[in-house]
Image (spheres, rainbow, N blue to C red):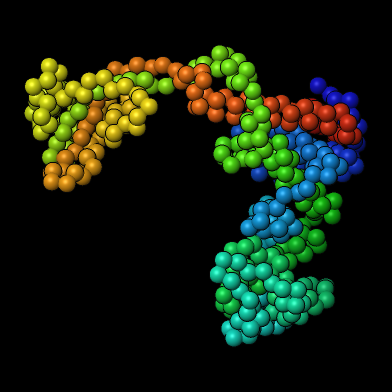
Amino acid sequence: MMHSAVKSDINDNSIAAIVGGEAITTEALEVFYQQAAPDDFRTTRESVLRDLITNRLLAHWREQSGLAPTDNPVGFSTDVAVADQLNGLIRLYWRKPLENWLSEQAGGMDGFVQKTSIPAPDRLADLLRNKGQMSFTATEQQQLLFSQTVLLTYRLPGGKTETITLRDIYDRQNVQGRIQLSRATPAYLAGQVEQLLGHRVVEYWAREHSGLTSADIRSMKRVLIDRRERETVLKSLGLFNVMHSSNPVLRQLADAVTREEVADYYRNQKKQFSRLEAVKAFHLQIDSQKKADDVYSQLIDGLTFQEAVKLYSVANDHGEKELGSLGWIARTEKAPNWLESMAFMQKIGIPSRPVKRPAITGEPATWEIILVTEQKKGYYAEDSETVRYLASRQIALEKARTQFAQLKERLRKEVPVRINPDYIGVF
């Protein structure tokens, strides 16, 4: 279905789509298509382009709505993360021509270096003197000193001499990296400098020798930014980390669910609230790990449980009408003991592996094998806390998903989207 703001009128083969005035180039589309598991027949260029367009629409909405972008407080900044991801894509998909070009340069990567100036440990310790055990944040004065501390000078073909400073390295670190940096280890700092030089060489090669246009590089970078923008939108709707109990938006939505909504959901989705009410179980108690393992092997090979109890069990239940019987174990409000818990975990007709009984002072160690022969199933009560929690959370999730679907539909109608006719099956 073509939406009102979507037009199929692009005649430039280098452009796959234009969303809100920003282009998604065919080269960028190809890279992300290759990244999206092309061995799966369900993955097509159209399906990948649909996702890229959707992410761009969500990014547009995030920017227009004033919703604050989210950065992981202990992770890399958006600029650093996106630059690293883009660098990685170029290294991956243009590996061979990049390697060939590097092999043609005198001295390879080292040939670009003019001077290395990694400070000695005592100088580093002086620069990083306000380090803490759990974190490290440079003061403004330190950051100025970092900017003046040149660690490496280099020159790329046809360019001028450039530098890598301690500030460049500091700005690229996440929290863990800054803590590592604060330990004033020259070897760590040298590794970071080498990594950043490699990063800049790849950026230079992509601009000058890869055949990629500036529009291609800009489009790839924007796609990576859009992915993060999508994450921001999902978080705002409660749809990011939906399985995590600390999701604050989803929890707020769940708290607003009414008793009537819970009751209605319970009646319509009662199967979701089934539970095991009771099991009929038998046990076999053995006095050594070696013997228990041997008996378990015999049971797997066909020895009946009753015969095994008769031959090997040291429990005082041989007089029972059914040897080794634990009877029916019912689920109650009281916490089950370890043997009851074990019984509720077993599948019907399959003996458990031997489990050592918790130590009891003055009693010898024993190992238990459990066999469950019957199960009785029932349902959590409609007014139980379990039903309230599970149902309200699921109702909240469905509301959030509906809101997300409606947002995407509205954006497709409101934001101008132009598509190359070669990808007309996108919408």
Image point 67% across, 69% down: which residue? 137
Q: Quadrant of the C terminus?
A: top right
Percent from the top left, x then y, of residue 243? 57, 36
* Residue 246: quarter of image: top right
- Using the image, determine if residue 234 lies above or below residue 211: above
Percent from the top left, x then y, of residue 283? 20, 28
Percent from the top left, x then y, of residue 290? 15, 42
- Using the image, determine if residue 124 lies above or below residue 255: below
Residue 70 appears anywhere in the view: yes
- Using the image, determine if residue 198 lies above or below residue 361: below
In-image side of 158 versus 321 (left or right)? right
Q: How many marks?
A: 0
Residue placed most toward the observer, 131 or 204: 131
Image point 71% across, 26% down: which residue? 402
* Residue 239: quarter of image: top right
Q: Quadrant of the N terminus?
A: top right
Residue 94 appears anywhere in the view: no
Residue placed most toward the observer, 312 or 425: 312
Image point 62% across, 63% down: which residue? 175
Image point 55% across, 25% down: which residue? 388
- Using the image, determine if residue 44 lies above or below residue 382: below
Residue placed most toward the observer, 81 or 39: 81
Percent from the top left, x then y, of residue 273? 49, 21
In-image side of 22 versus 293 (left or right)? right
* Residue 124: quarter of image: bottom right
